[in-house]
Image (cartoon, rainbow, N blue to C red):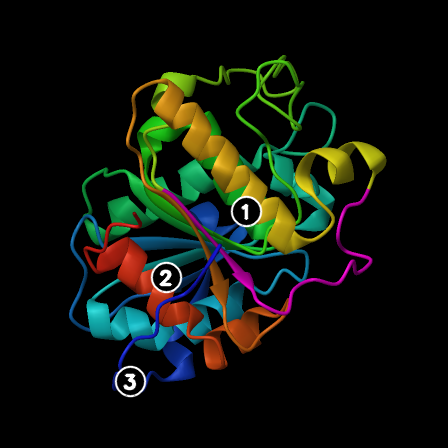
Amino acid sequence: MSAAPSSPPTTLPEVEASRIAWRRLGGTGPRYCLFQPTSGSSDDRLLIAVHGISRNAREQARLFARHAERDGVTIVAPLFEPATHGDYQRLGRVGRGGRADHLLDEIVAEVSSNQGLASRPLRLFGFSGGGQFVHRYAMAHPDRVAAAVVSAAGWYTFPDRGLAYPYGIGAPDALPGVGFDLARMLRVPVTVLVGERDHWRDPELRASRRIDSRQGNTRIDRGRRWIEAMRTAARVRGLATPYRFELIPRCGHSFRNAVRRGGLGDRVFALLFGGETPA
């Protein structure tokens, strides 16, 4: 377990709130929030930011916008509505609503077409329930992901074929078209970031004897154990894929506090766009 390294203070440009805009897929479909830097962004400067159960897609885009303006990054923050994508954290299993991974692919295709961006592997960030979505998306579609940062996820899918999905990667019948490929998924670098005070078992934390015994009692325990499991699975296969676990200082389970007090934005953009290898 390590603390997120401190970074020297950086001057971030101001961003008008009006530049963070809602869009609808195809003009009338599901909503997503979009921020575009004034300098424009290149094909690999696209951040997918995924909300937790508070559905704070716009807040994520707003609090990351100054970093994105500085680094020339376009932000896409999809909104997974409870009525249509209530199971988005687990990608949308059969009989539990729409496929959230398919919706993200459609949104990315639209933004890329509108902005003239070539298709490139994605750089993903997710907080809490969004962290669940992000790591499962990366495991299900590794060829579409360049790197991911998972922040404060409540629980995880382990690289274990002996456990049925979503506890492990065995028997993914609930996700038609997905066949978990260990050799490929273990090539995607992932960093898990959790607030150093995020050790309470609040009502939003999924708890059961099965999850607690396997993954731990807190988000800190669970993030650390998942990173250890991914490291071990990669090394068994001779892969040196970087996996890292870090604590975010001075915050608990709050995206806003993690950005404003814990430096979450600096870490996310350094890891995904700063050329830093999360060794």
Which residue sits at x=69%, y=62%?
199
Label whose residue precedes the other's in the sequence (3 or 1): 3
The mark total stands at: 3
Label whose residue precedes the other's in the sequence (2 or 3): 3
Q: Does residue 119 show up magenta in the picture? A: no
Q: Does residue 191 show up magenta in the picture? A: yes
Q: Which residues are magenta?
A: 190-207
Prevalent SS, magenta region = loop
Residue for badge 3: 9
Q: Mark 3 belongs to which amino acid?
A: Pro
**Could one spot residue 6 in this view of the protein?**
yes
Distance from label 2 to label 3 (Cα)? 15 Å
**Could one spot residue 103 in this view of the protein?**
no
Which residue sits at x=18%, y=64%?
40
Q: Position of residue 119 (x, y in %)?
A: 23, 37
Q: Which mark is residue 107?
A: none
Residue for badge 2: 268
Q: Mark 2 belongs to which amino acid?
A: Val
Q: Which mark is residue 224?
A: 1
Using a 10 Å C-alpha cutoff, classify the residue at mark 3 as few (fewer than 14 neighbours), some (14 to 19) or many (20 or more).
few
